[in-house]
Image (cartoon, rainbow, N blue to C red):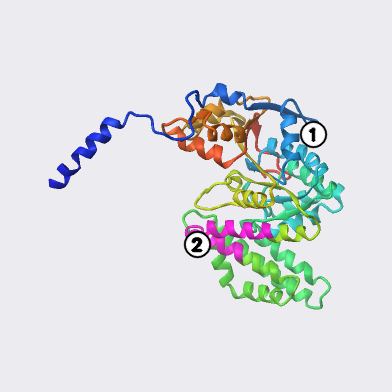
Amino acid sequence: MKTIIKFLPILIVLACTSNETPVINPTTKVNSIPLSEDYISQKTTYFTINDGHIEGNGLAVWKELIATSQFVMLGERHDSEATSQLVDAILPMLNTTGFKHFAVEVGPHSAKKLVALSTPIEDTKKNLTAFTEEYAGKEDHEIPIPFFRATSDAKFLKTTRSLGMELWGLDQEYFYATEYFMDELLSFEENSPEYKNLETTNKEVKAIIKKWYEKNADDNVEIDFFEEIQKDSVVQKYLSHFRNRTDTDQIIKDLEISWDIYSRWRNDSHADRISYMRTNFMTQYTKALEKEKEPKVLLKFGGLHASKILTNDCYDLGDLITQIATQNGTQATILNSWHRYYIDSEGNEVDYLEKYPNYYNRLQLFMGLAKRDQWTLIDLKSIRNDIKNGNVILPTDGDYHRIKSLIDGYDYQLILPIDQQSEGLVKNQ
């Protein structure tokens, strides 16, 4: 009781002052204006994409941000038809200003496979289709290489290769890539006298992998997929053979890193995944520095990977390229993407503002500017500077946190026109 009485005066003071507006920004000016949709609209431009070219007022913004940046990072909506069309449109613009490198959310060796599949360049779609068809499962996500499953993905891959841009794979190898990698390893022994025996073992290994994939798909069975396949003596014998080759040893090491990340997903392996991506970026960037003073890089990753502030308790790629650009005295420009209008798998139009109100209602000042038939491009960097200079006041209710993390994390917010899942190269993909 004495403790409660002791703190009563403090509680009374807090209660009496709780209605006062908190000082969020010490530089706030007398004539500062609150953040509003009308204000944000003044920082917004629109554009369309026609025949692979950006048109409209937003074109000038794209030209400016590309011309002034060493790094451009697109925090994408995965498997988006509109996003793949945008990537295909900006690649030539980037390339003409010195961007020679394109980092994507696939594994290092899957990136090399994509290069092989797009050689010769005119056969890119045909080769990628055959490859996906050979290794794809029944579900959309059961593909050997993610985010290169669609016709529009094959198109921008072809554009990348046509421009002579180098493809960097930074992520772990994909969950459903295991079977294809067993064949990939075998291809290194095609001219070896041991090939026939290894081919027989390869078939046994793939049968084992298929068995565990099927068990893993059963919701009633809890297994550690990669631990189980690695415990198998046949699998270990097969992998051990390729550990002894200098040209395949790194593939095994990267596969084991990827498998470990998947196996420990409940135990903070996300942090290890992000560190792996950062390390892979620095490896590629350091190599590029041997030939270029300031290598220019386009990065295409999911939105959380793009943020320059802490996300999921990690400092992701957006943070890394921002640090590098700061050290170089250059610019890293980071764009985030949202959907407002979307055609779902059943052909129904969905409004994300209505479907996901718990998230987007706090961002309605931005989302309200979306258009069904145009790309919306909001200059968050300019808004951030206005806030820093005390000209604009952020809301002080619960909206503050999500809005601030958006403005601090990205330089531009893209809101896609009406969109849908990109058309798969293979049926059901």
Closer-to-camera residue (355/139)? 355
Most common SS among magenta residues:
helix
The N terminus lies in quadrant? top left
> Does the CB distance between marks 1 and 2 fall below 8 Å?
no
Q: Quadrant of residue 418?
A: top right
Q: Position of residue 324 (x, y in %)?
A: 66, 52
Residue at 81% from the left image edge and 31% from the top image edge: 51
Residue count near mark 1 (Cα–Cα under 10 Å), binned few <14, some 14–19, many ≥20: few
- Per the image, the residue denoted by label 1 is 52
Identify whether 7 is placed above or below 228: above
Closer-to-camera residue (380/358)? 380
Which marked residue is nearer to the observer: mark 1 or mark 2? 1
Q: Is residue 274 magenta?
A: yes
Q: Is residue 376 visible?
A: yes
Closer-to-camera residue (327/204)? 327
The C terminus lies in quadrant? top right
What is the span of residues highlighted in magenta in the rendered image?
Answer: 257-282
Residue 223 is marked as 2
Secondary-structure class at tag 1:
loop
Q: CA distance from mark 1 to mark 2?
A: 46 Å
Tell me which label, 1 or 2, sits earlier in the chain.
1
Q: Is residue 44 magenta?
A: no
Residue 187 is marked as none
Q: Of the residues shown, which amino acid type is indicated by label 2? A: Ile
Q: Position of residue 58 (x, y in %)?
A: 71, 29
Secondary-structure class at tag 2:
loop
Q: Is residue 219 left or right of residue 239?
A: left
Identify whether 232 is placed above or below 91: below
